[in-house]
Image (spheres, rainbow, N blue to C red):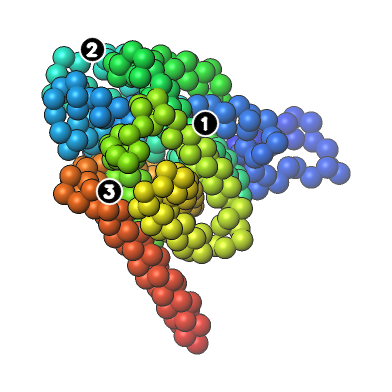
């Protein structure tokens, strides 16, 4: 990342032209990056918030509609779930090469291009003539969106002061939660009246508005330095990141949290349409208003880390998610809703902590570090969507919950291992000093 003292040369030139012996030149350590309350910070935050809204609204636009897709095309829940898995899987596959393009052509340029293509494909999705065509279009849409998540976190790491980074990334993740919530709520009610095709078309139009506002609002980068597109350089950077045990643990944590989330929200529509609930599509869509809890938990992740530390925050997120999974087993709609609230709060808090920790840990190649996290994260989403549907088919909702509990156990195990590794390093340092 370029030095923060980008205004130093201008200061020196001014001093050379009109020297003032009694006035010392400005220190080169002045941080010119954005901070809360500073110029451009609010515009930047809102622009990336809108990008997050568009990303999740498009990426999961068919998730709440899977029962209707199953009926329309005459396919099973597992087959219909591929309309979600294909999008998230393609995103996971393409996020790393897209991050390399962002190193060469710039974060804002690539994010704009990604949203433009994804929105264009989103306007074609309602016209898919078969389940196969729908899956292909969703895969293309996911690949296009791959240029946004890693580029956004890299942009923030370069343009925002370190102390404000977790909060800034939390706001971007909050945009994800609003996009996921609004997309599902809107599609639920629209689909109930006019069908799933009109519903996903509506999301496409909303995403167009978000993309235009994003491009108009996002400040031009001031601290970006173009990198190389050489495969050898990219491979070396990726290898270095994968050799970092802390980064690898964070990647695994992101994937496991998303496996829980993807499995639960892919299958919940099928559960709520069945007895004893038998809810209509519009009401099921409204269930996703619980995403607002994720907006709050993600945006407050910075304060949570300040009080509990990174590992303490992850323990809390895992415990909250576990409690939600267990509550959701009840046949009471109220308890199921409370369970979804806790699952959502735990997931978004854990995701915000893990993703911001990646940006903080990587000292170079931040776009690639973030891309690897996003790749793992969306592999978890794709696996969760598919395995959650398979588990539901095999064992009902209890099967999906069992899959989620195993994933949370993985999060806790990795975090405990990280705690032991950190203590071992701290014990070795005094010994080396002697």
Residue 49: x %, y % from top left: 52, 31
Q: Is residue 316 visible?
A: yes
Residue 49, numbered circle: 1
The 10 Å Cα crowd at callout 2, few under 14, some 14 to 19, many 20 or more, is: some
Q: Nearer the viewer, mark 3 or mark 2?
A: 3
Q: Which residue is mark 3?
A: 397
**Mark identifier at residue 127:** 2
Q: Is residue 93 left or right of residue 173?
A: left
Q: Residue furthest right?
A: 22
Q: Secondary structure at mark 1?
A: helix
Give the percent coordinates (x, y) of residue 315: 46, 63
Q: CA distance from mark 3 to mark 2?
A: 32 Å
Residue at 25% from the left image edge and 29% from the top image edge: 67
Q: Nearer the viewer, mark 3 or mark 1?
A: 3
The answer for how far apart the CA atoms under marks 3 and 1 are is 33 Å
Could one spot residue 358 in this view of the protein?
Answer: no
Residue at 27% in and 57% down: 402
Question: Around disc 1, counting alpha carbons within 10 Å, would you say few (fewer than 14), some (14 to 19), or many (20 or more)?
Answer: many
- Please provide percent x and percent y for residue 422: 44, 72
Q: Say whether disc 3 or disc 2 marks the residue closer to the N-terminus.
A: 2
Residue 326: quadrant of the picture = bottom left
SS for callout 3: helix
């Amino acid at each position: 990342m370029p030095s923060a003292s980008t205004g130093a040369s201008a200061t020196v030139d001014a001093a050379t032209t009109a020297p003032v012996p009694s006035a010392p030149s400005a220190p080169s350590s002045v941080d010119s990056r954005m901070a809360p309350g500073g110029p451009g910070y609010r515009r930047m935050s809102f622009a990336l918030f809108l990008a997050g809204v568009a990303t999740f609204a498009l990426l999961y636009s068919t998730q709440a509609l899977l029962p209707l897709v199953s009926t329309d095309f005459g396919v099973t829940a597992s087959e219909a779930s591929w309309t979600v898995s294909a999008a998230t899987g393609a995103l996971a596959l393409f996020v790393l090469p897209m991050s390399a393009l962002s190193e060469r052509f710039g974060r804002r340029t690539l994010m704009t291009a990604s949203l433009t293509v994804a929105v264009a494909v989103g306007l074609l999705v309602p016209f898919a003539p078969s389940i196969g065509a729908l899956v292909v279009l969703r895969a293309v849409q996911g690949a296009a969106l791959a240029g946004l998540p890693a580029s956004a976190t890299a942009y923030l790491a370069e343009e925002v002061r370190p102390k404000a980074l977790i909060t800034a990334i939390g706001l971007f993740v909050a945009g994800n939660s609003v996009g996921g919530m609004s997309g599902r709520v809107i599609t639920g009610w629209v689909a109930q009246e006019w069908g799933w095709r009109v519903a996903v078309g509506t999301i496409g139009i909303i995403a167009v508005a978000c993309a235009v506002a994003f491009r108009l609002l996002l400040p031009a980068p001031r601290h970006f330095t173009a990198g190389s597109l050489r495969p050898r350089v990219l491979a070396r950077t990726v290898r270095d990141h994968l050799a970092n045990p802390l980064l690898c643990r964070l990647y695994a944590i992101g994937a496991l949290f998303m496996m829980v989330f993807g499995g639960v929200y892919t299958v919940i529509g099928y559960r709520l349409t069945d007895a004893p609930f038998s809810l209509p599509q519009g009401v099921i869509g409204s269930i996703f208003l619980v995403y607002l809890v994720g907006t709050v938990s993600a945006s407050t992740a910075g304060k949570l880390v300040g009080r509990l530390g990174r590992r303490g925050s992850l323990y809390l997120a895992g415990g909250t998610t576990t409690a939600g999974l267990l509550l959701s087993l009840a046949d009471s709609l109220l308890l199921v809703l409370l369970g979804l609230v806790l699952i959502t709060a735990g997931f978004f808090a854990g995701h915000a902590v893990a993703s911001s920790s990646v940006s903080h840990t990587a000292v170079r190649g931040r776009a690639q570090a973030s891309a690897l996290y996003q790749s793992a994260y969306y592999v978890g989403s794709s696996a969760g969507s598919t395995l959650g549907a398979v588990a539901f088919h095999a064992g009902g909702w209890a099967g999906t919950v069992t899959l989620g509990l195993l994933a949370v156990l993985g999060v806790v195990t990795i975090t405990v291992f990280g705690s032991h590794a950190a203590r071992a390093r701290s014990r070795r340092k005094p010994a080396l000093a002697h």
